[in-house]
Image (cartoon, rainbow, N blue to C red):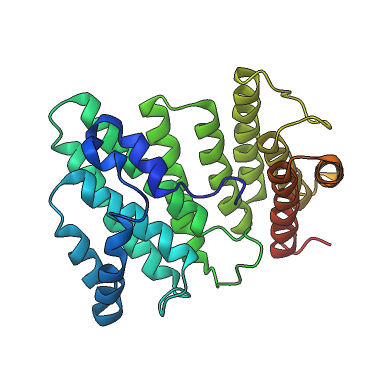
Amino acid sequence: MRAHARVSVWTLIVALGALGGPLLGQEASEFPASEWPAVRAAMEAGGVDAAVAHINGFDVPLERLQLYAHVQNTLTWEEWPGRDDLDNYIQLSDAAITSALWFASTAEDDEEAARYTNAANVFSYNLAAELAVCWPGDDRIREPRHLERGLEAARRCIVRRHRLGRSAESYSMAYWAAGVHLLALDRPGAAAEAFEEALFYAREAALEADEPASVGPRAGLNVLLNQGFSGLALWVAGDPAGRSRYRNVMNITHAQEARSEDQQAAFGAAFIRAQLERMRESVGLP
């Protein structure tokens, strides 16, 4: 589980909505999961180019996008020979985005085009999230060009989500992704602005869900996450309020984990703390 984790293949299928037809009723053990061994074999024999060619052999839009989503997700979690090279993930994700936008440009109506554009939005967010430096236990090297590419993907997410009229939570996720990359690129001022936008929309989402929107013991994970990252950015920028903001979130999430009877909520609080600690270490703060 990740706070602001990548979006799963099944979430993407739901996002595509009525385009799904009977495929939406299939079990996770069937397509697209059943096609992964063939994609992996192609990739191991001929690299990402071969994997993309195999996936693009599926002419039905939903099938191709389902398969891209499944492979994009699987490349993150499953061990395979090219996993440590983030350029492979970027290449696969770019191909997925290109396919989704092509289907959007040739859609029969605006509703269908919006579904395919949203698929591109999901692929872009996953790319931005994968390239972020904040994931505990992920020691793969992120070079500046990877961070710049992640920032570009996050910014395109922001634009697409506003054009599509997505939810406040969706906007929050996209601004958070931009902020993470800006902070890693040593642009703390711009990062702080992005995290403030993310926090604004996190609070909007909390209000819409009739949940506490202010930072405190009962605050939701999204509000706390963005408050904590905002504190880090301000801390790096030299604002003394940043460290206290960060420490306050760490204390709140520790208390939430300790008192929660809900295992998932406790895990979420612990994971936010781990993300923030990982990011603090990556930017060289004590």
Number of marks: 0
Q: Is residue 124 left or right of residue 42?
A: right
In which quarter of the view is residue 165 placed?
A: top left
Q: Is residue 141 left or right of residue 238?
A: left
Percent x, y of residue 270: 75, 51
As drawn, 164 above or below 67? above
Percent x, y of residue 123: 38, 49
Q: Nearer the viewer, residue 184 or 65?
A: 65
In which quarter of the view is residue 32 placed?
A: bottom left
Percent x, y of residue 267: 71, 49
Residue at 71 percent of width and 33 percent of height: 220
Residue at 71 percent of width and 47 percent of height: 233
As drawn, 18 above or below 254? above
Percent x, y of residue 278: 71, 60
Q: Nearer the viewer, residue 2 or 33?
A: 33
In which quarter of the view is residue 257 placed?
A: top right
Residue at 47 percent of width and 55 percent of height: 150
Q: Is residue 196 left or right of residue 168?
A: right
For the C terminus, give its image quadrant. bottom right
Q: Is residue 239 left or right of residue 34?
A: right
Q: Nearer the viewer, residue 24 or 17?
A: 24
